[in-house]
Image: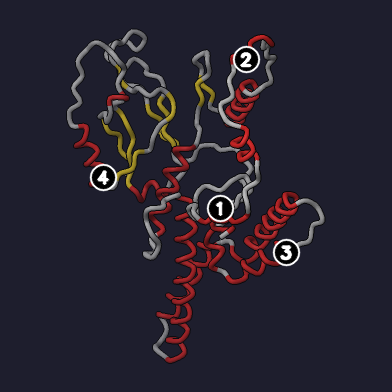
Amino acid sequence: MARVLNCFFENQQLQPCNAKIIGVGIFDVKELLFEFNAVDLGFSGNKFTWAKGNWGSAPIKRRLDRSVASISWRLAYPNAAISHLGAIKSDHSSILLDTNPKDSFTHRPFRFEAAWLRDESCHSVIEKVWNIQASRSKFIKLYKRQASTRDALRTWNEQVFSQCQDRINLLLSKIKHIQEKSPSQDNELTEKSLQAELSKWLLRSEVIWCQKSRELWLKLGDKNSKFFHLSTIIRRRGNHVNTIKKDDGSRIHDSSQIRELFRNNFMDLFKEEDICFLEHLEHLVLPSITEEENNSLLSIPPPEEIKATLFQMQDQKAPGPDGFPALFYK
């Protein structure tokens, strides 16, 4: 079930003005949402949904309207998005709920899944590819090993490990079919085997969704992937860019135009510029580090130091461009 609430939570949801604003029931509403396990669906567009008087000259604006949903509804519609539209002859702006917004295809980078390590064949795939011979520098060797390992794991995942939920559903169907039969010794042994295999795949599913949710405080063991699934949906929707406000005040909603705007903005931000530095001012810039400190910073750390630093990192923290978290190298 999804509902619309008329309330505000924080002072940041108020437009500054000279009027005295009293936030009544702010914490009561938060506690209410927590009590009923409600999830805020977020929004895109204007952050205010109500204005006192005409919108163009209103001294007070607030975000009174917000959409919340139950956990089951959010899991059923993971891509649902809320948009704040313009107000037409009203002090409240219209709210649009799109349960299946249009999303263009984007390239998905490689990410090493921690659940792969629970399959014995994964280790053999990595060892076989990682031991390839390369006659160049150590950096080139590492780069080639990472690239070959990514390709091998992609192929192995599609052929062996993919469709985790489909396998769980298949095992549940087989268990139900066995339990409906007449009691026998063979049926008992078959059910035990299916139950053991189901527990293995449920644990894999939990590890997968735990890694995607980026929740590090909750330990594994309850096979409750529902919490991790919900955390993943909320995190992804929070990171998703639905609209961009340009410098002229207009908004862009098309994903291809948003990507182009990001690209052009960063190209303009990091473009090379001509620097004019007068030679007679060089003495004003004093050295901040000694020659010994500079040599220490430029030196390559020994393998022992690299290993010690790597093993101090969290196993499933966000990986680098290579797609491998610290867990892979441990």
Contact between marks 1 and 2 (CB within 8 A): the answer is no
- Residue matched to label 3: 131
Q: In the structure shown, which secondary structural element does the residue marked by tag 2 occupy?
A: helix
Q: Earlier in the sequence, mark 4 or mark 3?
A: 4
The residue wearing badge 1 is 325
Q: Are dots 2 and 3 in contact, CB under 8 Å?
A: no
How far apart in space, not on screen, are marks 2 and 4 (Cα)? 61 Å
Q: Mark number for residue 283? A: 2
Residue type highlighted by circle 4: Phe
Q: Marks 4 and 2: in contact by CB < 8 Å?
A: no
Q: How is the image coloured?
A: secondary structure
* Cα separation between marks 1 and 3: 20 Å
Q: Is residue 99 visible?
A: no
Tell me the CA gap for discs 2 and 3. 53 Å
Residue at label 4?
A: 34
Q: Earlier in the sequence, mark 2 or mark 3?
A: 3
- Find the distance from the CA under tag 1 to the CA under tag 2: 45 Å
- Name the residue type under label 3: Asn
Q: Nearer the viewer, residue 193 or 142?
A: 142
Circles 1 and 3: CB distance less than 8 Å?
no
Q: Element type at marker 3?
A: loop
Give the class, few, some or many, for how many residues have Cα within 10 Å of label 1's Cα (few <14, many ≥20): many
Task: Give residue 295's position: percent from left, percent from top.
Answer: 64, 38
Q: Give the image location of residue 235, x and y in percent.
A: 44, 43
Residue 224 image-quadrant placement: bottom left
- Report the quarter where the N terminus lies: top left
Q: Quadrant of residue 330?
A: bottom right
Residue 275, relative to residue 40: is it above or below?
above
Side of 34 relative to 204 (left or right): left
x, y percentage for residue 81?
A: 44, 36
Q: Please state if 94 lies on the left or on the right of 302 as rendered.
A: left
